[in-house]
Amino acid sequence: MTKFRGLPLLVLALSLAGCGGGGSGGSPVAASNTPPAAPTPAPPADGNLVTSVPAPTYTAGSGSLTVFNTINALRSKIGSGLLAQSLLLDKSAQAHWGYINQNGSAELHGETAGRMGFTGARTVDRIATAGYSAAVSGEAIYSTGAADRYATCVAEWANSVYHAALLFASTIDIGISANNFNPAGGATTLCVVDIATSISQSAQLPGAGSIRAYPYANQVDVPFVFFNRNETPTPVPDLLETGTPVTVSFETRGLAVNTPIAISQFALAPVGGTAVEARILVNQAGKLGPVIASNGPALVDDGLMQGFTATLVPAQRLKANTAYSVALIAVVDGKAINKSWTFSTAAQ
């Protein structure tokens, strides 16, 4: 069996984009086995966010239940809608978990016909094999060389560049397989999450004028470092490590795709201090959403970024136990947006 490498391995495959993820330095999400609260703040009236879902059927105390509740709790705080358990997506996630367990992690999201546990070469194929008819779908994978690190799966996806898409995705359903397995190097946590919207469902999005962000307003214990070299592929590959990324999603229900988004300011600074050196990553060409242009700050065009999204990546790790302020000024769908919020990093 192929042995997992010692560092965390995070990979995200969305039919809308590519792969990525990985970081640490704090605990942005706490494990929970209780249903998440309703999203706060409440979305504008013209949004169609899902605010309640049926209780999941995962076993009490299981890794899958921890991942389900932790993802939905964080999506609520960001202002994204909740995801509902899909038994068919559970089936596809469990199948790929089993494939990795039997064949190793070298193929990540891929599978090879004829190998043990094969159900489909691509995520979309495995979801279809499970009987789910998806209009859009994606998959996130996390593993680390320690057992029972289920909440860490979500924490690492959140503290990333590409994996943050899981928290902002407009999908409706989720399937999870989160368990320990035992490669040659010892017990390892492996989380596989499939998300999708079926051909009979509509995307869920907040109302006009909403801006969703991670880290979210008043969040505490935010990681202060992001190990970008753990991503597949790697954002800002010339850097050995960065500060925790700050991601904003401009996507709202009814947002015109043919109207460019123009960013005038996107900055991060210690409260009362000077803005940190950072890079702003966007899918600038409008391949997956509106064209994103600049009215001031330099933008880095990254074709793996989701549409409607910008991510600020600090060039160096942030200070521990420090309050930071984010300033965002932009024109979205022809309307001016001026938003600021603060968050605090974890202790050293």
Image: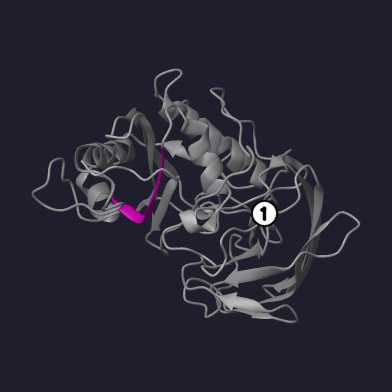
Q: Position of residue 205 (x, y in %)?
A: 57, 54
Question: Eyeballing the image, is 283 above or below 5?
Answer: below
Q: Is residue 147 left or right of residue 73?
A: left
Q: Tell me what residue is drawn at x 28 percent, y 34 percent.
A: 183
Q: From where the camera sits, is residue 174 visible?
A: yes
Q: Quadrant of the C terminus?
A: top right
Residue type pointed to by label 1: Ala
Q: Which residues are magenta?
A: 133-144
Residue nearest the viewer, comparing 140 with 83: 140
Residue nearest the viewer, comparing 290 with 267: 267
Q: Is residue 98 left or right of residue 175?
A: left
Q: Tell me what residue is drawn at x 66 percent, y 45 percent.
A: 223
Residue 138 among magenta residues: yes
How many numbered circles are shown?
1
Q: Tell me what residue is drawn at x 22 percent, y 41 percent.
A: 99
Q: Tell me what residue is drawn at x 72 percent, y 40 percent.
A: 346
Residue farthest along the right direction in this orientation: 272
